[in-house]
């Protein structure tokens, strides 16, 4: 089994826990309000605005023996620059105020997701951040286009209110192939362990981010 397949296998339970979050389940069926969609985009803005800084921090912390990863990091950075502004434009197109969203304090759950990744990069192993990349890109390829279509149709919002989701649903399919090729070149057991650890934890932390988004429909999923 190559490392990528091992990563998929060892994150299965954490991934399924994320996919069982009521806000996500209902979003995939379009059963959310405009307020819930805007609240989701607002939290997405806050964590996505750190993607490029995360990658820059990772690159700066790599030891000389791992600097071959700089090429992959640079490619990811070029793809991710400015995506947080797409989200703000989506908020405005959905009827929200993008400057209000820009200046909100993110939910604690979002702050924890952000802080965890900076801490792991700085204090433990910068290569581990690839686990966060895996969580975000594998999730978006599974849900982005389907969720965007469903919410757009149910809420009657214009397609331009979903540029972030549609772009990631398409982009991350090619990103995942590139990611798979990259991580299969990582043979250091400690680096592999770090990537799996961060992936497992960020699936859990991102589930918490979604759980914290106000959503009336979640009551019908309660035990």
Image: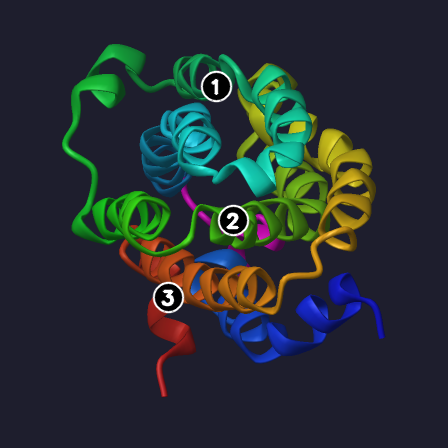
Q: Is residue 42 magenta?
A: no
**The C terminus appears in which quarter of the rendering?**
bottom left
Question: Which residue is label 2 attached to?
Answer: 127
Disc tally is 3
Mark 3: few, some, or many residues within 10 Å (few <14, many ≥20)? Answer: some
How far across and how far down the image is residue 72, in percent?
Answer: 67, 30
- CB of mark 3 within 8 Å of CB of mark 2? no
Q: Tell whether 198 sits left or right of 187.
A: left
How far across and how far down the image is residue 74, in percent?
Answer: 61, 21
Mark 2: few, some, or many residues within 10 Å (few <14, many ≥20)? Answer: many
Say which quarter of the image contains residue 137: top right
Question: Which residue is label 3 attached to?
Answer: 218
Along the polypeptide, which appears first: circle 1 or circle 2?
1
Along the polypeptide, which appears first: circle 3 or circle 1?
1
Give whichever of 135, 222 is nearer the camera: 135
SS for dot 1: helix
Give whichever of 124, 117 is nearer the camera: 124
Is label 3 or label 2 in front? 2
Question: Which residue is label 1 attached to?
Answer: 90
* Residue beneath the point at 35% across and 80% down: 222
Residue range in magenta is 25-33
Asked if residue 17 is positioned above or below residue 164 in the image, the reply reads below
């Amino acid at each position: 089994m190559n490392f990528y397949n091992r990563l998929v296998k060892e994150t299965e339970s954490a991934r399924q826990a994320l996919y069982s979050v009521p806000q996500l389940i209902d979003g995939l069926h379009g059963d959310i309000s405009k307020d819930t969609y805007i609240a989701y985009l607002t939290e997405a803005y806050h964590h996505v605005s750190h993607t490029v800084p995360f990658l820059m921090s990772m690159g700066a912390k790599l030891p000389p023996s791992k600097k071959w990863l700089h090429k992959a990091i640079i490619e990811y950075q070029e793809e991710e620059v400015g995506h947080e502004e797409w989200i703000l434009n989506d908020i405005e197109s959905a009827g929200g105020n993008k400057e209000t969203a820009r200046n909100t304090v993110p939910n604690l759950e979002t702050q924890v997701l952000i802080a965890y990744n900076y801490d792991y990069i700085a204090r433990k192993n910068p290569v581990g951040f690839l686990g966060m990349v895996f969580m975000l890109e594998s999730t978006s390829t599974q849900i982005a286009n389907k969720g965007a279509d469903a919410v757009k149709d149910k809420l009657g919002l214009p397609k331009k209110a979903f540029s972030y989701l549609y772009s990631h649903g398409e982009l991350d399919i090619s990103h995942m192939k590139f990611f798979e090729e990259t991580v299969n070149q990582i043979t250091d057991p400690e680096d592999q362990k770090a990537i799996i650890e961060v992936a497992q934890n960020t699936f859990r932390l991102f589930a918490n981010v979604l759980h914290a988004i106000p959503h009336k429909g979640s009551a019908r999923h309660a035990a």
